[in-house]
Image (cartoon, helix red, strand yellow):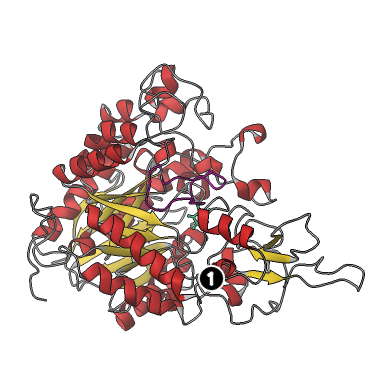
Amino acid sequence: MSAPAPATHDGGAPLPGPATAEWWQSAVIYQVYPRSFADGNGDGVGDLPGLIARLPYIASLGVDGIWMTPFQPSPQVDQGYDVSDYCGVDPLFGTMEDFDRLLELAHSLGLRILLDVVPNHCSSEHPLFQQALAAGPGSRERELFHFVEGRSSGPESPSDLPPNNWQSVFGGQAWSRATPDSDTDTEWYLHLFSAGQPDWNWRNPEVGDYFEDVLRFWFDKGVDGLRIDVAHALFKAEGLPDAPSASPVVDGLRSNPLVSDQEEVHEVYRRWRRLAEQYQPQRLLVGEVNLEPSRAARYTRGDEMHQAFAFAFVRLGWDAVAWAAVGTELEAARTLHGAAPTWALENHDIVRSATRFGGGRLGARRARAALVALLGLPGSAYIYQGQELGLPEVDVPVDSRVDPMWARGGVTRDGARVPLPWAENPSLTHGFSEREAAGPWLPVPEGWGDYAVERQQQDPHSVLHLATQAIALRRRLWDEGVFTADDGGTWRVEEGTLLLCERSPGFLVALAMGAERVKLPAGVVLFSAFPLAEDGWLQPDNAVWIRRD
Ligand code: BGC
């Protein structure tokens, strides 16, 4: 592979990255959920000034950049994934000047900034949706969205039923009446998520042009890339036919093939890639493509996105055979389309790994080991704020839950979104708020201070220390050329429960997923999640990186 020029940032100092690969191929990205990261103004909601103050902490982890979930103006029906102005900053989080300061400081600390773009839907408060409502049935304004005449249950009840049987990802039907009390406006509009999130009609070219302007706005500012929300769902099957089954959505959009993975969507990402490549350095596109590996890989063909999250492990329990099968599938997809997996075990939508892997001390051990394993695998890795602290899922009291998914009858995602504990002392919500504050937007549980950054920074055995060391070693291995962008992974299971990923010739990631100790594979142990207790053996729930040559 030819060595790309070092990434400079619009005249600024070069940002780090190995000389032999594009920076994202080796990257560890830290996901910031701004409302729960740090509260600078004491209103109980995290914000940009809070994030700015804590940027040195993120830089100290040694990560390459930050992906920020939405902070644009929004009624916050879905905590910002209902955007009413794609090119602004919600006053809840600060101002555009704050954002500009954030970007500048991040770059000066060697951190890239990725933003979340939400192209499948906007907020029902978005001016273009409001204009469409006002313009009425049959108008050009309504063609930007999916407004469709309802079906009728009988001659007496015109349009009293939604246009088709599609279900919302959040539960309930995916349609709402445009003007509920009107006799003349009998149209419904489509929303794959909540009623406050109308879907754009991507078959109308004006929508594509609109988003191109949005991308240009942020790219021109110097934003380094975008995470693309629900990237596989923008196009719906022509004619919006009934789905084969109207059963409740149990696994995102995957149970309705008519709203997912339509071929036309790829043209959007080809256009976005061409745009990203017009910038120097080129901007990164990473997709939330919630499909099985072989389908998701098609979104990272050479002229589409650079990355798509590999979520496959998230759906699995602590099971070496299942992980090896998924690893093999992802490797096959990489071989086919060239883009290495983009590993993620957690994000703001998923139950925290310490809880998924068994909860309590067992889950905590496994989450720690899984994080070490993840950071050694070929491909880039995304970690979610608090994962580096080993935070568990919180059982948020029912009265305090705000997730619209919960409100529409689904599970709640609030438990992974509880404000970060910075300080052991419970005052000011463990340092989440920098000033005397209103209560945090989600309550923190008893004992939250045990996970505090401040405490873990002083403990050489903490998850925080471990994660920082793993990231540092990973970077060194890239710099020394042990890890390269061409690395693949050969996956297998030994002794029934030892998961192995042979990375490039001579490097092995091993994760002991059984209840019994297993033989430590031959080679020099470079790193382990826990100290090795016995010569030649690997204890349950430990992970190691091994150099074989
Ligand atoms: C985001 C969720 C959000 C949904 C709708 C997801 O992929 O990560 O938090 O609720 O898209 O925008």
Q: The magenta stretch spans which residues?
A: 72-89
* Residue 33 in picture, x, y percent from top left: 41, 43
Left or right for 15, reference 388 = left
Label the magenta part by its dominant secondary structure: loop
What's under tag 1, amino acid-wise?
A: Asn
Residue toward you, 169 or 387: 169
* Residue 510 in picture, x, y percent from top left: 32, 60
Confirm whether the magenta stretch covers residue 87.
Answer: yes
Q: In the picture shown, does residue 427 fall above or below 495? A: above
Q: Residue at x 27, y 38 (%)?
A: 97
* Residue 421 in picture, x, y percent from top left: 40, 29
- Quadrant in the rendering for residue 280: bottom left
Q: Quadrant of the C terminus?
A: bottom left
Residue toward you, 256 or 143: 143
Residue for badge 1: 201
Q: Residue at x 45, y 32 (%)?
A: 45
* Residue 233 in picture, x, y percent from top left: 51, 70
Q: Tell me: is circle 1 under 8 Å from ligand 1.
A: no
